[in-house]
Image (tube, helix red, strand yellow):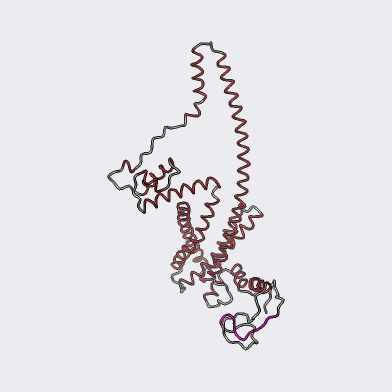
């Protein structure tokens, strides 16, 4: 028997038809649902009540596929994956679809959390900067007063002759010494295209030329920079100089907004890169369970389901962090997921505890290794390509 938590009943009575509106299969007029495609046998015009009913009843119904997947996925590690590969699929949401939905929700929550944090940080920075500016102004006035008193006291003790003018000059030099003692004489940058006339200029030296010339001439376009330096307008030269301009633009953006825009771009790249690295990670999982008779796709189902739980736990963490500061207990969620992963591997692969613990350690080490490589690649790509 179906039980719905929230039920939106349309005012109009259901009118049954003699043909399925979805697949056009003939009906006898008494069926509630099409026996071929499963669509409800109703010819009513779409109303607001019908729309809300179809929207929420499937999601909030107690025996809907969402709850039949979501609840055991969290409470019975490995069971959903095992039941799915054994053929019990009609009761569960497709693991790839569920992963997509949960990951979208996670990145939305993450974006909201970062926006709230960044607004709080910006307010604190503005308040601190204002305090420092006022303090600096007071200190500057005090310093100017001390210097003025020192000059007056020193000059009053000297006779009024040419020696006094010399002392004034020397005293001024000593006072301004702290402004000039750390300044080093910068050598003019020597462009590689002017010095390296025999060897072929490599990519890094070219980008270095473009960077220094752009810094001195920020208003010039990429083609104007190439013309000014004497580089040919080849595809690669245009590509290199564009990346230099992108990096300079991203660097200025990070300084202006504290990295908020860059972090949004980074998270969007991460969400895409996971689809590439999870299948690669599955290859390693298959390798350590090479003696178990599982296909690659069956391993992949297990990986997507466990990754879905990982995103669910992170989503819960960030939602709780919006109301209560949980930075100091973030490790609890990490331990909780590791325990979940251990139980899921034990149930799904049916191996003893010692082997499962060893493979869990290997698996997490490889996951961290892949994650580090992926993060570096994503960070470089998101910073370089505008």
Magenta run includes residue 21: yes
Which residue, as the protein is rendered here, is positioned at the far left?
198
Work out whether residue 169 or residue 271 is closer to the camera in this orientation and state it. Answer: 169
Q: Which residue is drawn at 67% across and 82% down?
A: 15
Q: Horizontal and vertical percent for residue 311?
A: 57, 62
The answer to whether residue 11 is left or right of residue 77 is: right
Q: Residue at x 32, y 41 (%)?
A: 194
Residue at 57% of width from left, 14% of height from top? 156
Q: Residue at x 45, y 44 (%)?
A: 219
Q: What stretch is highlighted in magenta?
A: 13-23
Residue 336, relative to residue 228: is it above or below?
A: below
Of 301 and 270, which appears nearest the observer? Answer: 270
Residue 29 in percent (x, y) is at 64, 87
Q: Residue furthest bottom?
A: 28
In the image, residue 206 lies in the stretch drawn in magenta:
no
Q: Which of 250 and 81 is in front in this view?
A: 250
The residue furthest right is: 11
Q: Quadrant of the N terminus?
A: bottom right
Judged by its main secondary structure, the magenta piece is loop
Task: Give the x, y percent position of residue 18.
Answer: 62, 86
Relative to 177, residue 73 above or below: below
How far across and how far down the image is residue 232, in percent? 34, 49
Which quadrant of the view contains residue 11? bottom right
Q: In the image, 195: left or right of 310?
A: left
Answer with left or right where residue 331 lies relative to residue 386.
right
Q: How many labels does the image show?
A: 0
**Looking at the image, residue 261 lies above or below residue 309:** above
Above or below residue 316? Residue 35 is: below
């Amino acid at each position: 028997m179906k039980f719905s938590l929230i039920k939106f009943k349309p005012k109009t009575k259901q009118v049954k038809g003699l043909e399925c509106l979805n697949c056009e299969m003939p009906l006898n007029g008494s069926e509630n649902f099409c026996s071929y495609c499963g669509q409800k046998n109703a010819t009513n015009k779409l109303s607001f009540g019908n729309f809300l009913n179809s929207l929420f009843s499937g999601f909030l119904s107690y025996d809907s596929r969402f709850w039949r997947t979501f609840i055991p996925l969290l409470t019975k590690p490995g069971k959903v994956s095992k039941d799915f590969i054994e053929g019990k699929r009609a009761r569960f949401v497709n693991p790839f679809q569920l992963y997509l939905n949960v990951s979208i929700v996670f990145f939305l929550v993450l974006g909201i959390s970062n926006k709230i944090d960044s607004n709080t940080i910006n307010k604190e920075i503005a308040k601190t900067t204002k305090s420092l500016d006022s303090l600096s102004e007071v200190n500057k006035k005090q310093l100017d007063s001390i210097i003025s008193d020192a000059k007056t006291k020193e000059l009053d003790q000297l006779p009024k002759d040419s020696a006094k003018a010399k002392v004034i000059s020397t005293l001024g030099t000593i006072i301004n010494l702290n402004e000039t003692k750390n300044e080093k004489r910068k050598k003019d940058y020597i462009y590689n295209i002017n010095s390296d006339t025999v060897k072929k200029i490599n990519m890094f030296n070219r980008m270095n030329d473009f960077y220094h010339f752009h810094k001195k001439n920020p208003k010039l376009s990429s083609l104007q920079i190439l013309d000014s330096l004497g580089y040919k307008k080849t595809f690669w030269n245009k590509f290199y100089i564009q990346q230099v301009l992108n990096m300079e633009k991203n660097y200025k953006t990070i300084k202006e907004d504290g990295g908020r825009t860059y972090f949004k771009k980074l998270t969007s790249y991460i969400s895409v890169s996971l689809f590439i690295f999870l299948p690669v990670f599955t290859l390693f999982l298959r390798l350590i369970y090479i003696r178990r008779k599982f296909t690659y796709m069956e391993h992949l189902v297990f990986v997507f389901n466990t990754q879905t739980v990982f995103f669910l736990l992170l989503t819960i963490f960030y939602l709780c962090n919006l109301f209560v500061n949980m930075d100091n207990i973030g490790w609890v969620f990490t331990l909780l997921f590791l325990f979940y992963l251990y139980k899921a591997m034990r149930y799904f692969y049916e191996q003893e505890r010692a082997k499962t613990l060893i493979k869990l350690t290997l698996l997490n080490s490889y996951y961290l290794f892949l994650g580090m490589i992926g993060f570096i690649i994503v960070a470089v790509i998101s910073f370089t390509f505008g």
